[in-house]
Image: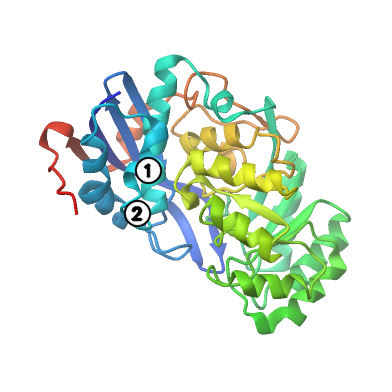
Amino acid sequence: MRLESVELRRIRLPLVAPFTTSFGTEAERDILLVHATTSVGEGWGECVAGASPLYSSEYVDGAQDVIRRELLPRLFAVELLGAADVAELLRPVHGHPMAKACLEMAVLDAELRARGEPLARHLGAVREAVDCGVSVGIQPSIGQLLEVVEKYLAQGYRRIKIKIEPGWDVEPVRAIRERFGSIPLQVDANTAYRTADARHLAQLDAFDLLLIEQPLPEDDVPGHARLAAMVRTPICLDESITSARAAAQAIALGACSVVNVKPGRVGGYLEARRVHDVCQAHGVPVWMGGMLETGLGRAGNVALAALPGFTLPGDTSASDRYFHRDITEPFVMHEGRLRVPAGPGLGVTVDLDLVEALTTSVERLERERSPVLQKR
Ligand code: OSB
Ligand code: MG
């Protein structure tokens, strides 16, 4: 195919409730959508970068800037473009995996729609529905935490994850165990601890958690290996897993025994599948992470979560856990599961009128007007 033009559209979408992590509180999402027009048809992508560089170094304005200046010109320059070529074409640009991922996503969607193939089938899915967990932000009080968890359990979520940070860890976990017994429960620290906190984190061993997600900084994989030797609860990495190679190295070092897979963090769905493959080859269970995506990203995530190595429930929650109204047909949970879209490509339809109403800016980039990049 040939990539003819791309619309970079920013939308503002309020969350049903503010989401608090160790790195901040979000009340609404500022989302970059990619609408690609190609010689074989259209495709959509969603960028998962946050408004500020707090989860990782990427942020949505930076992503749009590098897409405009560096990434799209490299894709426009090719006559015969396939989704499988995108990552290699963008490799000269260091970093920016979330910016790269949303472009690959749009090209992949267009390619698969054109040949009538669902993304799930393309990736190697083996199930028609996936188990849903839910990620619960840091709450103002234990009482409010218990109320939120009770509501999600009543809705049928099959696993609860709570965000933790120093000062909000052992007591909230204890309170949940005392109230709800042996429910599947895990915690996510988003890098809020240091190696010196190992003894403190070992107190969580008393609560039979599925895992502790990313307790230490992104670049401290060896630290996670030392921590893993000091706590019994399985260590899961999120932020540190930036590629399939990083996953293989973390596993070899003994830094994690579970992996959170997020396409945006590793540069796209195709690399995310390789993360799954590497983990599966090592017998390491994976689960699908989330970045508060709209129905577009959710469609892709649910497709990937249908691969055989995804043996734990993901942060693939229903649309109504995030938004009053989604920009695609909503993902609705039935008995704690979401159905994998069966239509071509992402298999969902964007509500163009709603997107228009939510739009804060539109930038149109065309192949014809794209600068010719000099080889360096
Ligand atoms: O660390 O998994 C994370 C949301 C934004 C950024 C990072 C994370 C999260 C979540 C929410 O935990 C997962 C979701 O429901 O999408
Ligand atoms: Mg996480």
Image quarter where the N terminus lies is top left
In-front residue for pair 65/26: 65
Q: Is mark 2 within 8 Å of ligand 1?
A: no
Horizontal and vertical percent for residue 91? Answer: 35, 49
Horizontal and vertical percent for residue 307? Answer: 65, 34
Question: Left or right: 90 with respect to 300?
Answer: left
- Distance between the alpha carbons at the discs numbered 1 and 2: 22 Å
Horizontal and vertical percent for residue 294? Answer: 48, 39
- Image position of 192 with respect to 317: above or below: below
Question: Left or right: 94 with respect to 244?
Answer: left
Residue 325 appears anywhere in the view = no
Which residue is at the far top? Answer: 116
- Image position of 263 with respect to 344: above or below: below
In-front residue for pair 94/307: 94
Q: How many marks?
A: 2
The amino acid type found where label 1 is placed reads Glu
In-front residue for pair 342/237: 237
Q: Residues within 10 Å of mark 2 (few under 14, many from 20)?
A: many
> At 75% from the left edge and 48% from the top edge, which residue is drawn?
283
Horizontal and vertical percent for residue 353? Answer: 33, 27
Q: Is mark 1 within 8 Å of ligand 1?
A: no
> At 57% from the left edge and 72% from the top edge, which residue is drawn?
220
SS under mark 2 = helix
The amino acid type found where label 2 is placed reads Val
From the image, tell me which residue sits under label 2: 60
Residue 88, which numbered label? 1
